[in-house]
Amino acid sequence: MPSKVVSPAQQGSNVQNEKILRRFLLAQDSLVYQTADLSLGSLSGMMSPREGGEAAINLDPDFQRRERWSPDKQSGLIESFLLNVPVPPIYLAEDEYGKYSVVDGKQRLTAIRAFMAENLELRDLEKFVELEGRTFATLPEALQNSLNIRPYVRVVTLLKQSDPTLKFEVFTRLNRGGEPMLPQELRKVAYRGALSDLVFDLSDSQFLREQLKIISSNSPAYKNMEDAEYVLRYFALRSSWQSFSGSLRGELDGYMIKNQHSKPAQIKSLRRDFLRSLNGCQSIWGEHAFKRHTGTGWRSQFLAGMYDAEMLAIGELNDSQLEKSIRKSATAVKRTAALFTDPVFEKSVRQGTNTPSFVRTRIKAVTELLKAL
């Protein structure tokens, strides 16, 4: 009996199908997980540091967001538990035996920890209004026992033997359907590496946080990662302001992509450069740095356009020019205030601030001001 002739097209299709099957089977073996239903008391205990050690659950792995839920939203989650309303599962990754990092569910875990640790009063409840103003300790004993013992939360744990790259893959896929991620949150996830570590390290600079009015982890600018984005903004514009495209997000993303895995020497240079400019702004303008003058006084609002102008202007100065600018800081502050009497400059820092010509206008104006001191 003659053998069946297989056409080239069929051969190609068979090869492709075999490739698909191998990839499918590999995926089945790459992710090993287990599920468990835990009580709020158990989860709270896992988030509390052990005596002389760390908590079992790390809420802040590199790829995670900062805490963003308001007390109202946290209260709504606790109300859901008390009403026995199902909530989405929490995903953890086993880093080592007995140690886990949160992959998905950080905001829910943070709310649970806050309530069980007496750091949250229930508010703005939709159904269980009788519990308004209550903390965990002031709940009826039966409700306390229920939260401590009853398994309310499904927890899916990616075991240590799973492919380590899948932790990040699971995070990104789970978050596609959740609360939209802000641009800087996406960068933290997508471009992990030496540059991202530097950006978040420098975002902790005290003067920058003072000017952004970041006084705690509840401050809006902190929750939205504005401090980190301004650090990255300096780096990106420092290298491109004279040829800026007009797409700030594109510039920031492009800079992260290009420099994601910077070498230690470059990271050291970037750190020194940023701190030189930031410290220079503090020495020259003090509390008025990154602010606008109205003609009668300085506004307290942080102005992104003035941040660009002052930080990058200092980057254009050599050391002797910077030292002279610091010595003549009073004159610099007075002349900076006078810049706002120029309608072109005023517009460049307040309207259409991503317009390429406006970016160049404001940076050149402050640079020339300092060099002329």
Image: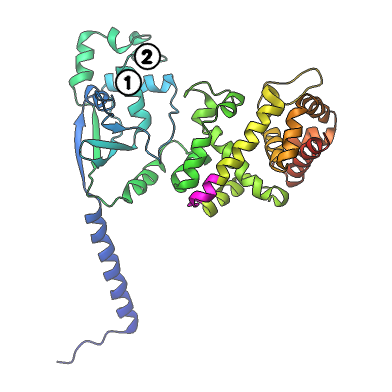
Residue 84 appears in which quarter of the rendering? top left
Q: Which residues are magenta?
A: 260-268
Front residue of this view, candidates 187 and 39:
187
Q: Residue at x 26, y 25 (%)?
A: 52
Q: x and y percent of residue 349 in the render?
A: 74, 34
Residue type pointed to by label 1: Ile
Q: Which mark is residue 122?
A: 2
Q: Residue at x 29, y 13 (%)?
A: 136
Q: Residue at x 44, y 32 (%)?
A: 66
Q: x and y percent of residue 322 in the render?
A: 72, 36
Q: Earlier in the sequence, mark 1 or mark 2?
A: 1
Asked whether disc 1 touches disc 2, contact meaning CB atoms under 8 Å apart, the reply is yes
Q: Which residue is label 1 attached to? A: 78
Residue type pointed to by label 2: Leu
Q: Residue at x 42, y 43 (%)?
A: 176
Q: x and y percent of residue 76 in the render?
A: 37, 21
Left or right, 56 with reference to 221: left
